[in-house]
Image (tube, rainbow, N blue to C red):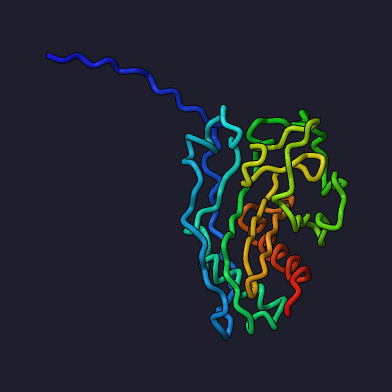
Amino acid sequence: MKSFLLLPVVVIFLSGCGTLSHKVSIADAVPPPTQYVTDKTGPDDYPGFMAAEGNIYSCRYGIHHQSREDFTPPKEQIFASLLAKHLPEVVKHNVVLHRFDVYVNNRPAALNTASFAIGGIIGGTIAAIGDVNNKVFAFKNIIIDSDPTNITSKPTENAVGCDNEGEGEYYASQISGTVIVTWLKFDIDSKPYHFKTYHQLQSDFSLGIQSAIQLTIEGIASQVALR
């Protein structure tokens, strides 16, 4: 008769805090008159809750990736509709969407660091942008980085999240608190565009994510040069 040793499984998560997933509906993101966007985004690729967001030993602790199922209409339609709204002439061009990811970085609250700085001072509204240049700029109440692949780890500051993972990380010297991080990567007539934006949450999660997406696409529309 075989005997089995039952080992205890330790589950690490913030008491009373489950997944941050919230449904996001953008009602005015109606299909544009022309199907000008080709969706080449891949499937969701983020570790499960207990491997990342809910694991206090992970640098992803407290950082949630909004899944495809959380968005109505689908993310590619939201992108196409809002981009055409702010850049009407774009519907005459060929656009290929490669990435559209939204992360809710609630790590400071999850770690209960209201009075403790993670690599910098946790302040109020958008802080002074650390590495000010013409590729990182403020638009209304978001920060837009038009060259996010150029960011490397800061030797004097730890990321709020995982350094250089290209996910929901940010630096507290740039922005603070609960931050919605949005990534967009697309081509227009084969010309590549790549953006990362930061929006400090100032409302409930669903409205905050909706606002972050709308401001992101409005802001990047001003950076697109159509031929």
The answer to which quarter of the image holds residue 113 is: top right
Quadrant holding the N terminus: top left
Image coords of residue 22 (percent x, y): 55, 53
Of residue 28 and residue 32, the one placed in the foreground of this image is: 32
Of residue 39 and residue 76, the one placed in the foreground of this image is: 39
The answer to which quarter of the image holds residue 17 is: top right
Q: Residue at x 67, y 37 (%)?
A: 163
Q: Residue at x 54, y 81 (%)?
A: 35
The answer to which quarter of the image holds residue 78 is: bottom right
Q: In this view, does 221 lie above or below 24?
A: below
Instruction: Describe residue 26's horizontal placement relative to residue 115 as left or right.
Output: left
Image coords of residue 209 (percent x, y): 64, 57
Of residue 178 and residue 144, the one placed in the foreground of this image is: 144
Image coords of residue 141 (percent x, y): 80, 57
Q: Which residue is drawn at 63% across and 61% down?
A: 185
Instruction: Describe residue 48's horizontal placement relative to residue 183 as left or right.
Output: left
Image coords of residue 153 (percent x, y): 73, 37
Instruction: Describe residue 160's horizontal placement relative to residue 8 as left or right.
Output: right
Quadrant holding the C terminus: bottom right
Q: Residue at x 73, y 78 (%)?
A: 226
